């Protein structure tokens, strides 16, 4: 299985801050990397696919980059509705695997 | 508009078999490239991929659960069924089904998710 490691596990930030979450795969996965946002009690929501493509309807303050084993999710200016947990996920091969999540909390 | 919804028991006893149904609309599981996946999330923990069933009835399972889970589809009813045997308290989780979509880039994602259903394993 491909292991996905996110860092940090949690972070505290304020509205307006630039936030960066990283994800590392245990092997090269090209750009077969997706990012999801999950709020408490809700299903995950697709934000970014193929490492850097913004899903329709997702605000442009979200962006993704990277390839191979190392990826980044960036929120350029954190908004109140962005406090949530973020997961990376590889679809390079099965079993698809998720990172352990990064919780973005209010500072 | 694509929607999915999970249904099934909220409480199962240890050693019992869990059967969950994912009823969907807005797409056909007979369309090339389409799939439905199952994902679970123990309380306070991360997401775990369980398996996928494809439009051509090909199936992929998590190696750690391969001996316990089966995913089947009923295209005429727009349903996918997850069966998990020998349930244990560690299997307590919210179970999600999701629509597998291949994007224009060729990368597959879960672009639509059900609301999830919490299954508790306890005697």
Image (cartoon, coloured by chain):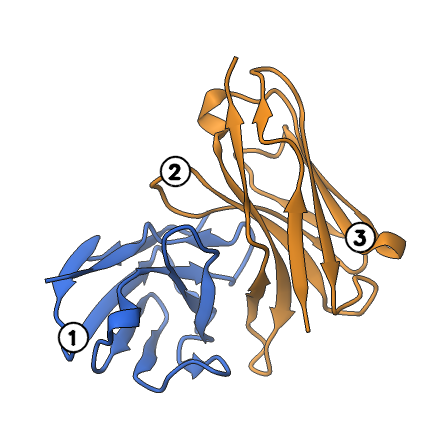
Chain colours: A blue, B orange
How far separated are the C-alphas under marks 3 and 1? Answer: 47 Å
Question: Which residue sits furthest left?
Answer: A107
Please indicate whether residue B17 sits to the left or right of residue A99 in the image: right
Number of the label disc, if any, that sits on residue A15? 1
Q: Is residue A76 above or below residue B34?
A: below
Please give the residue where the numbered disc 2 appears in the rendered image: B43
> Which residue is depicted at the point 59% across and 77% down?
B103
Q: Tell me residue B102's x, y (percent).
A: 62, 72
From the viewer's perspective, is the residue at label 2 or at label 1 nearer? 1
The chain ID associated with circle 2 is B
**On-image quarter of the N terminus of chain B:** bottom right
Give the SS element for disc 3. loop
Question: Which residue sits furthest right?
Answer: B76
The chain ID associated with circle 3 is B
From the viewer's perspective, is the residue at label 2 or at label 3 nearer? 2
From the viewer's perspective, is the residue at label 3 or at label 1 nearer? 1
Q: Quadrant of residue A24?
A: bottom left
Question: Is disc 3 in the same subunit as disc 1?
Answer: no
Number of the label disc, if any, that sits on residue B57? 3
How many numbered circles are shown? 3
Q: Tell me residue B66's x, y (percent).
A: 61, 34
Q: Nearer the viewer, residue B78 or B10?
A: B10
Q: Nearer the viewer, residue A37 or A32?
A: A37
Q: Is residue B121 above or below residue A15?
A: above
Q: Tell me residue B113's x, y (percent).
A: 57, 59
Q: Is residue A9 above or below residue B15?
A: below
Q: Are marks 3 and 1 in contact (CB under 8 Å)?
A: no
10 Å neighbourhood of mark 2: few (<14), some, or many (≥20)?
few
Q: Tell me residue B23's x, y (percent).
A: 73, 52
């Amino acid at each position: 299985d491909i292991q996905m490691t996110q860092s940090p596990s949690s972070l505290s930030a304020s509205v307006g801050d630039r936030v960066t979450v990283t994800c590392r795969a245990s092997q090269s996965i090209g750009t077969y990397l997706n990012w999801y946002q999950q709020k408490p009690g809700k299903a995950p929501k697709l934000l970014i696919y193929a490492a850097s493509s913004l899903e329709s309807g997702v605000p442009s303050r979200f962006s993704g980059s990277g390839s191979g084993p190392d990826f980044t999710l960036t929120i350029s200016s954190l908004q109140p509705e962005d406090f949530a947990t973020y997961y990376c996920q590889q679809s390079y091969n099965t079993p698809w695997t998720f990172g352990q999540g990064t919780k973005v909390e209010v500072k | 508009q694509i929607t999915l919804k999970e249904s099934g028991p909220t409480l199962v006893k240890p050693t019992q078999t869990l059967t969950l149904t994912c009823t969907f609309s807005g797409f056909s599981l007979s369309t090339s490239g389409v799939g439905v996946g199952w994902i679970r999330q123990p309380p306070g923990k991360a997401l775990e991929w369980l398996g996928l069933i494809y439009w051509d009835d090909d199936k992929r399972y998590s190696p750690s659960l391969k001996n316990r889970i089966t995913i089947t589809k009923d295209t005429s009813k727009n349903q996918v069924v997850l069966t998990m045997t020998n349930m244990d308290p560690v299997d307590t989780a919210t179970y999600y089904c999701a629509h597998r979509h291949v994007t224009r880039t060729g990368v597959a994602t879960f672009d639509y998710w059900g609301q999830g259903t919490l299954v508790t394993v306890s005697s």
